[in-house]
Image: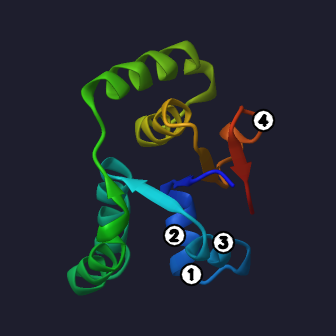
């Protein structure tokens, strides 16, 4: 079974205890550092720093850094798909997953029909 690369959408759904996402905690998964930064910001905005810091610590062992070459590929991917209005963070996660033979887990409709995506609602 392939390792999963979770996006911000998936992390929020895990936080909200969506049963369709909770099982990913029992699988091999990674969270790229940029996705964690975006998730941290959302938790900080919607809750408080204590909650954001708690979740950061909870997921810290799963964090993976992103090489600048992947960032550049993500910028190109986003530009090539500019009509789809994809977020930069999601593009980085998606390209990271592709480059590392992982499945990208998301509920963002823009990725629904892309290769190596596990689309979950």
The quarter in which the N terminus is drawn is bottom right
Relative image position of residue 49 (x, y in whole percent): 21, 80
Is 42 placed above or below 67 here?
below
Q: Is residue 118 above or below residue 112?
A: below
Q: CA distance from mark 4 to mark 3?
A: 19 Å
Q: Residue at x 67, y 76 (%)?
A: 23
Q: Residue at x 55, y 59 (%)?
A: 9
Q: Are marks 2 and 4 in contact (CB under 8 Å)?
A: no
Please give the residue where the numbered disc 3 appears in the rendered image.
21
Q: Position of residue 47 (x, y in %)?
A: 34, 82
Chain-order first, disc 2 or disc 3: 2
Question: Which mark's residue is nearer the viewer, 2 or 3?
Answer: 3
State if disc 1 and disc 2 touch (CB < 8 Å).
yes
**Pointer 4 or 3: first along the chain:** 3
Q: Is residue 36 above or below residue 32?
A: below
- x and y percent of residue 37 in the render? 29, 56
53 on left or right of 87: left
For the C terminus, the image quarter is bottom right
Q: Which residue is mark 1?
A: 16
Alpha-carbon distance for marks 1 and 4? Answer: 25 Å
Query: Badge 4 local density, few (<14 within 10 Å), some, or many (20+)?
Result: few
Residue at screen point 71% across, 32% down: 115
Q: Provide the secondary structure element on which disc 3 rests.
A: helix
Query: Mark 4 — residue?
Result: 113
**Compared to 19, does 71 lie above or below?**
above
SS class, disc 2: helix
Distance in Å between CA atoms under marks 2 and 4: 21 Å
- Mark with earlier residue (1, 4): 1
Q: Tag on residue 12? A: 2
Q: Which structural element holds mark 1? A: loop
């Amino acid at each position: 079974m392939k390792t999963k690369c979770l996006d911000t959408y998936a992390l929020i759904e895990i936080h909200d205890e969506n049963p369709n996402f909770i099982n990913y905690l029992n699988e091999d998964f990674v969270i790229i550092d940029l996705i964690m930064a975006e998730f941290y910001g959302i938790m900080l905005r919607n809750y408080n720093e204590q909650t954001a810091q708690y979740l950061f610590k909870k997921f810290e062992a799963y964090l993976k850094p992103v090489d600048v070459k992947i960032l550049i590929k993500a910028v190109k991917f986003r530009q090539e798909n500019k009509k789809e209005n994809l977020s930069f963070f999601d593009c980085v996660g998606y390209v990271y997953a592709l480059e590392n033979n992982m499945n990208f887990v998301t509920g963002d409709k823009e990725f629904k029909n892309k290769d190596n995506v596990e689309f979950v609602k």
